[in-house]
Image (spheres, helix red, strand yellow):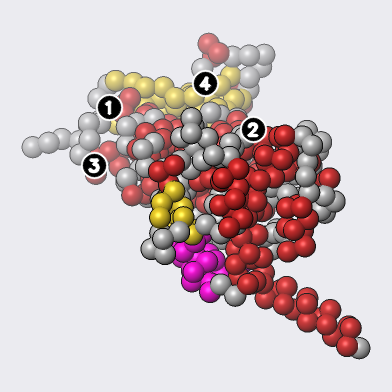
């Protein structure tokens, strides 16, 4: 018959580590005669310590507060012992100490789920997505360091308070100029990735409760920037003396007339140029982001740009600069053309969806296919922009009629 082990908890002052007039309080766990000692991270004056009761003397506020703390630790140690009994685990003083400190093998850490995600998703997620997870990891570790004064945390200790604390930490981040570093939607993207990490931990059995259960994501709706027909024409008609600006302009216009994002356009090779069902040139590729197929018949303006940069030596169809340089040159182009918009490469894709296609009567279902969207609801964002423009145009008409 299996007998229960002998078990005892004792609180004591470690006089060997006494500093000035204070000595640290330790817990001694004894199982079958073997001991393990745990610092309780509290200290007191030895003169106030009752060696028989193993608590502070008196009933003043300081003594009552510290004694309540010790009672809570006693209960926790007792619970660790009871849990190990229920699990039929090996019960030793060291095992109870490890369970009490959250250092036993049954508890996984935030660092472990981050590492597991990187290892298992390395061949699943696109490099850009993995890079975004890297940014979220950087912020999480910064939050741990600044707010929790540690480099790691057990998953079991991640709760609603931890989640909302991370949210507040991100909202307080400032750049070098003292301005907010992240927008609300940028913060929500980091919170989304953090939630996916905790969901993965739940699926793996590393985390019992969902810390995001009571946390609500709140994305702000915004109108995506795009060029009007007049602004698009003005850029087309402008000739730049600097070669870098002229090339960037043409690459940008190619995206305006095909809807291809930067990554997909940069990777275009001669293999992506095929003859479509109508016998004309088409671009056939897959979106780098979602792997959705893209089939885009080339408009004459896009085909003309391809002919401009025909190069039998290179396998790539277009001479594309780095994303950073491209966006820098686009800001110069916007300045020279006096376009009061924050011009980036992605504006070209939005311009294709709104000004080039939807505004000219192309059905939204067709536009969705051309953009490589997996959901029609994603494309409907642009339809709302068109509705807004219709409203503005009608208001302008009304003012003229009046």
**Quadrant holding the C terminus:** bottom right
**In this figure, which residue is indicated by the disc labeled 4?**
13
User: Considering the numbered disc 4 on the image, is that residue within a helix, a strand or a loop?
Assistant: strand
Point out the frontmost of discs 4 and 3: 3
- In the rendering, which numbered label is found on residue 92? 1
Distance between the alpha carbons at the discs numbered 4 and 3: 32 Å
User: Considering the numbered disc 1 on the image, is that residue within a helix, a strand or a loop?
Assistant: loop
Which of pointers 2 and 4 lies earlier in the amino acid sequence?
A: 4
Q: Is residue 143 visible?
A: no
Which of pointers 3 and 2 lies earlier in the amino acid sequence?
A: 3
* Spot occupied by residue 8 in the image (x, y as percentages of width and height): 34, 30
Give residue 33's quadrant in the image.
top left
User: Considering the numbered disc 2 on the image, is that residue within a helix, a strand or a loop?
Assistant: helix
User: Considering the numbered disc 3 on the image, is that residue within a helix, a strand or a loop?
Assistant: loop
- In the rendering, which numbered label is found on residue 87? 3
Q: Is residue 208 left or right of residue 397?
A: left
Front one among 158 and 400 = 400
Q: How many marks?
A: 4
Return the residue found at the far top. Answer: 16
Which of pointers 1 and 4 lies earlier in the amino acid sequence?
A: 4
Which stretch did the figure color magenta?
Answer: 363-382
**In this figure, which residue is indicated by the disc labeled 2?**
146
């Amino acid at each position: 018959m299996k007998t229960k082990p002998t078990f005892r908890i004792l609180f004591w002052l470690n006089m060997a580590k006494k500093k000035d007039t204070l000595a640290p309080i330790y817990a001694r766990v004894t199982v079958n005669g073997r001991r393990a000692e745990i610092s309780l991270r509290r200290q007191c004056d030895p003169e106030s310590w009752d060696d028989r009761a193993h608590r502070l003397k008196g009933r003043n506020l300081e003594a009552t507060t510290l004694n309540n703390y010790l009672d809570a630790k006693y209960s926790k140690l007792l619970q660790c012992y009871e849990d190990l009994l229920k699990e039929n685990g090996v019960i030793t003083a060291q095992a109870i100490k490890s369970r009490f400190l959250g250092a036993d093998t049954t508890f996984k850490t935030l660092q472990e789920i981050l590492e597991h995600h990187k290892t298992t998703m390395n061949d699943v997620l696109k490099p850009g997505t993995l890079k975004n997870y890297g940014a979220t990891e950087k912020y999480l570790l910064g939050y741990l360091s600044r707010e929790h004064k540690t480099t790691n945390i057990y998953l079991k200790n991640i709760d609603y308070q931890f989640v909302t604390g991370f949210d507040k930490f991100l909202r307080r981040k400032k750049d070098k100029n003292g301005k907010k570093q992240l927008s609300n939607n940028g913060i929500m993207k980091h919170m989304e990735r953090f939630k996916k990490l905790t969901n993965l931990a739940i699926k793996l059995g590393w985390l019992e409760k969902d810390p995001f259960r009571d946390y609500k994501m709140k994305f702000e709706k915004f109108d995506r920037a795009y060029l009007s027909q007049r602004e698009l024409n003005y850029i087309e008609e402008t000739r730049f003396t600097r070669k870098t600006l002229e090339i960037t302009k043409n690459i940008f216009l190619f995206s305006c007339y095909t809807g291809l994002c930067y990554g997909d356009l940069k990777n275009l090779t001669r293999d992506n140029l095929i003859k479509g069902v109508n016998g004309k040139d088409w671009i056939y590729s897959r979106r780098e982001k979602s792997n959705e197929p893209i089939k885009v018949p080339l408009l004459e303006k896009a085909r003309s740009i391809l002919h401009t940069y025909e190069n039998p030596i290179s396998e790539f169809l277009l001479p594309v600069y780095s994303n950073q340089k491209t966006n820098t040159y686009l800001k110069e182009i916007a300045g020279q053309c006096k376009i009061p918009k924050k011009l980036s490469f992605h504006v070209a894709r939005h311009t294709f969806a709104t000004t080039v296609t939807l505004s000219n009567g192309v059905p939204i279902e067709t536009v969705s296919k051309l953009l490589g969207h997996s959901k029609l609801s994603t494309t409907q964002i642009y339809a709302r922009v068109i509705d807004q423009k219709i409203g503005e145009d009608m208001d302008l008409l009304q003012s003229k009629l009046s």
